[in-house]
Image (cartoon, rainbow, N blue to C red):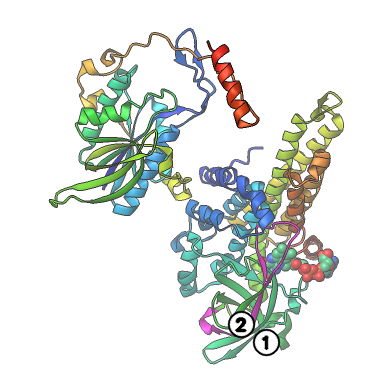
Amino acid sequence: MDYLLTDEHKMVRELARKIADEKIRPVAAKYDQTEEYPWEIMKVIAEAGLFGLFVPEEYGGISPTVLGLCLATEELSRACGGIAVCYAASALGTIPIVLFGSEEQKKKYLPDLAAGNRVAAFAVTEPEAGSDASAIKTTAKKEGDHYLLNGVKHFITNGGDAETYVVIAMTDKKKGARGASAFIVEKGWPGFEFGKKEEKMGIRASSTRELVFTDCRVPAENLLAREGMGFIVTMKTFDQSRPGVAAQALGIAQGALDVAVKYAKERHQFGKPISAFQGLQWMLADMATQIEAARALVYACAREIDAGAKDVAKDSAMAKMYASDVAMKVATDAVQILGGYGYMRDYPAEKYMRDAKITQIYEGTNQIQRNIIALQLIKETAK
Amino acid sequence: MNIIVCIKQVPETTDVKINPETNTLIREGVKSIINPFDMYALEEGVRLKEKFGGKVAVLTMGPPQAEAALREAISLGADEGILVCDRAFAGSDTWATSYTLAGAVRKIGAFDLIVCGKQASDGDTAQVGPGISAHLDIPQVTYVKKIESIEPASEGKGWLMRVERMMEEGFEIIETPLPALLTVVKEINEPRLPSLRGMMKAKTAKIAVWGQNDLKLDENSIGLCGSPTQVIKIFTPPPRTGGRRLQGEIPEVVGTLVELLKNDLA
Ligand SMILES: Cc1cc2nc3c(=O)[nH]c(=O)nc-3n(C[C@H](O)[C@H](O)[C@H](O)COP(=O)(O)OP(=O)(O)OC[C@H]3O[C@@H](n4cnc5c(N)ncnc54)[C@H](O)[C@@H]3O)c2cc1C
C-alpha cells in the first residue's frame, strides 16, 4: 500500500532496508545464538545517521520524526528484532531528554546520542514494579548539590552497554506516584553497577541487565524536569516511543511473512508447491492483510504525534497492542507454513516467533495497553 | 587533497546478456547501478579526503540518467558530481572515452589524484583508467590494493604516494609522485553504506553537465568517429563444462591421471 511518504521518509526506509539486507540479515542468526551485543551493526546504523532520527537538528539530529523512527525500526526489525531493539531502546532513553531536558542537559547529552557515539537506555522497571510502575522502590535522596540513588532496576534493555541512562526513582515516597523523579545517570559513576545479563527467549542480540545503585551520587543538575515529574516523564516518553515498539512488531511480522511466502513457493508436496493449496493461501492472505492494517494504524499514530497532537496515549496504545498481537499471530502462522522446518533453528521462521513475543510484553503489556485504551474510552464518553 | 573519482553507470547484473543481432547489451528491465569496482574507488577517494582534507569530485560520462549514479556517489561522501553528456560523445570506445574524460579532468583544473575502478563490469576492458592517465600524461598505477602512505616529496615539492599493486602472484610496491591515476581492486577497502545526511544532500545537489561546447575537444577524437575500435562480433561463450575430480589414495589417483592424460587427451 502506498502511504504517500515524503522523499525524506522514503530515504529513511530505503537506507534502513539496505542496512537490514546487507549488514543485519547475514549476521542475525549469529547474534541470536551468541547473545552478544551487536556493536558492529550499531556502528553501521550510527554512520548511516539513523540515531539522528529522534534528536532535534540543533543538537545534531537529522529531520527527526516519530514516523521516521518507526520506518527505520520497522525495516531493521524485518531482518532482526533483537538488533532493532538495541537501536529503538536508545531512542527510548533519548526521548525523555529531548522532551524534558534543560538546554544544558540537551547540549551535553544529545549530540553524542544523535551521532550514535553513545547508546541510551530507559529504566523504570524493578523486580517488584512491572506493570505497576508506581510501586518502584529505588530512591533518590537530595544531599546538597547532588542526589544519592539507591535501589535496583531490572530487565533494562541496553543495560550495561548504554552510556547514558534515564532512571526513575522516588524523591518523595509520601507523595506516591507524584513523588517520583527522572535522572540522567552515566555509566561508570561510582555506585552504579550492573547485575546479571538475562538469557532470553527472543531478541537475543539485545542486552537486558539489572542496574544496581548503591549510594550513587547524581549531580542535582542531572535531575530531568522537576522533582515529582518522574511518571509524567515516563508516560510522555512511552506515548512517543510506543509507535516504535509497534513498528518493531510490524517489521518482525513482515519479515516472517516474507519468509513464509518464499518458502511456500519453493516447497513441494503432493506434486505441487504448497502455495497452491488454498488452505495456505488463505493464511497468507490473512497475514498480509493484518500486517497492512497494523501498518496503517502505526503510521497514522506516528503522523498524528508528528503533527503535534496532544493526547496520544490511547492511539499509541492501540498501535502498540494491535501491531504486536498481529506480529505474534503472523509469526506463529509463518512457523506453521514452514511445517517441521519452521520449528528448526536452521530456518529463520522460529526466530521471528520468539522475537515477536516480547512486543506483547514490554513497554506496557498488552493487557496494560487495553487498560489504557478502555480508560480513555470511558473518560471520553463521560465528557 | 583534491581527488577525482571516475565512475560508470552499468546494468546491475553479473550475467550480462547480449542481443545477438545488434551485438549490444540488453539493457531493458535491468536496474542501473554504479560499476561495483568504482564503489571501491569512490570509498578510497572519500577516505583520503577524510584523512587529508580537500574534495572529492565524481566524474562520469554517460546518458542523462547517469546523473543518478553521481547522486548516489554524493550520498556516499563525494562533494560534487560532473556528468559528461552529449550526443557528440555517443558511441565512444575506450580510447575516445578516456580522451573525453581527460578533457573533463582538465576543465576541473587542479587535482592531486584520480581514482578509477579496475574495470567496468559491463565492458570489462580495464582500459579507460589507464587511457585517462595517458591522455593527461600523468603516472598510473593499476590494480592497487592498498595505499601505504602519502608523504611530502623529499624536495619539499608535491607528494609522493606509495602503493601496493596486486599481481597474479604476490604484489608490487610502487612509489609515484602526485598527481597520478590509480585503478583499484576490491581488496582495497570495504565501501560504506550511504548516510541519511548524504542522501539528503545528494537529492538537492546540483550536478554539472558538460558537453562538447564546454569541453571543446578535437571533433575527430570523440564519439563514434573518434573511436578506432571496431567490434567484429560479440557472443556469449558456451558455458564451460565441469571438470572431473579424481578421488582416492594419491599414488592410485596419479596413476589414473597419467592414464587419462595419455589416452583421453591424446
Ligand atoms: C526483554 C525485556 C526488555 C525490557 N526492557 C525494559 C527497559 O528497557 N526499561 C524498563 O523500564 N523496563 C523494561 N522491561 C520491563 C517490561 O516493561 C516489563 O516486564 C513489563 O512492563 C511487565 O512487567 P512484569 O514483567 O513485572 O510483569 P507483571 O506486571 O508482573 O505482569 C504479569 C502479568 O500480569 C498482567 N497484569 C498486570 N497488571 C495487570 C492489570 N492491571 N490488569 C490486567 N493484567 C495485568 C500482565 O499483563 C502480565 O500478563 C523489559 C522487559 C523485558 C522482558
Residue A373 in the image: x percent, y percent? 78, 61
Residue A103 screen position, x and y as percent: 47, 72
Please indicate whether residue A276 sits to the left or right of residue A12 in the image.
right
Magenta stretch bounds: A196-222
Name the residue that disc number 1 marks.
A172
Amino acid type of disc 2?
Answer: Glu
The label shown at residue A291 is: none
Q: Circle 2 is placed at which residue position?
A: A227
- Image quadrant in which you'd find residue B82: top left
Compare residues A245 and B47 and report the one nearer the observer. B47
State the CA–CA distance, disc 1 to disc 2: 9 Å
- Residue ID at (69%, 46%): A295
Would residue B17 appear left or right of A179 to someone viewing this image? left
**Left or right: A204, with A280 as reference point:** left
> Crowding at label 1, few (<14), some or many (≥20) Cα neighbours within 10 Å?
some
Q: Is residue A19 above or below residue B252?
A: below
Task: Inspect this view and state whether residue A363 appears.
Answer: no
Chain identifier of the residue bearing label 1 in the image? A
Secondary structure at badge 1 equals loop
Quarter of the image for residue B45 reads: top left
For ligand 1, the image quadrant comes to bottom right
- Residue farthest toward the bottom in the current orientation of the protein: A144
Q: Residue at x 63, y 59 (%)?
A: A36
